[in-house]
Amino acid sequence: MSIEVNAPQTIRLSGGGPVVNTIVAGAAIKPGMLIEKYENAGVLNWRPAGTAANVQPAFVALEQDEMNLTVDDLYAIGDLVKAWAFQPGSTFWGLVPSGQNVTQGDPLQCDGTGKLKEATSQAASAGVAKFQALEGSGGAVVVDTRLRTEVVA
């Protein structure tokens, strides 16, 4: 008899690092997205991370469990966001967009929309692949899919 591994239903799976909850969303954010700070009319806001190259984001949006919200409940513009400053060795339940085919152990990087994509060999050798898939997607996905992800750098 095999043991079935269930989906965790929480974003932060393991690891340390502070949680910042004093900055609002400047755009719709789904828990599990990589996020970045930006200035909006003189006020610091969060948005989905917009870079796919060079410096990779260091924060992920957590679910608002204290408000009985799940990993599928979006932050609206103006909502206070629970943002986790993850560290190498930490694991989280990240988002992979439609069209990706991720194999367990693949290096991952931000796709420029706050989600993760398989890193090219060039990006991986340049140190841009800051993440690693701890499970595979089971083929090319046709909807946003969550995967256990480790922060490697």
Image: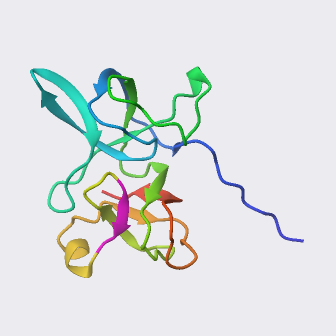
Left or right of residue 1: residue 35: left
Q: Residue furthest left?
A: 42
Quadrant of the drawing holding the C terminus: bottom left
Depicted 68 relative to depicted 27: above or below: above
Name the colour scheme. Answer: rainbow
Q: Nearer the viewer, residue 150 or 70?
A: 70
What residue is shown at x 57% (from left), y 21% (from top)? 67
Q: Quadrant of residue 83?
A: top left
Magenta highlight: main SS: strand
* Residue 61 drawn at (x, y percent): 40, 38
Q: Quadrant of residue 48?
A: top left
Quadrant of the drawing holding the N terminus: bottom right
What residue is shown at x 49% (from left), y 49% (from top)? 92
Left or right of residue 46: residue 73: right
Q: Quadrant of residue 39?
A: top left
Depicted 117 relative to depicted 59: above or below: below
* Residue 72 drawn at (x, y percent): 55, 42
What residue is shown at x 78% (from left), y 63% (from top)? 4
Depicted 68 relative to depicted 118: above or below: above
What residue is shown at x 20% (from left), y 79% (from top)? 122
The region drawn magenta spans 115-119
Indicate yes or no whether the magenta region holds residue 38. Answer: no
Left or right of residue 101: residue 49: left
Q: Residue furthest right?
A: 1
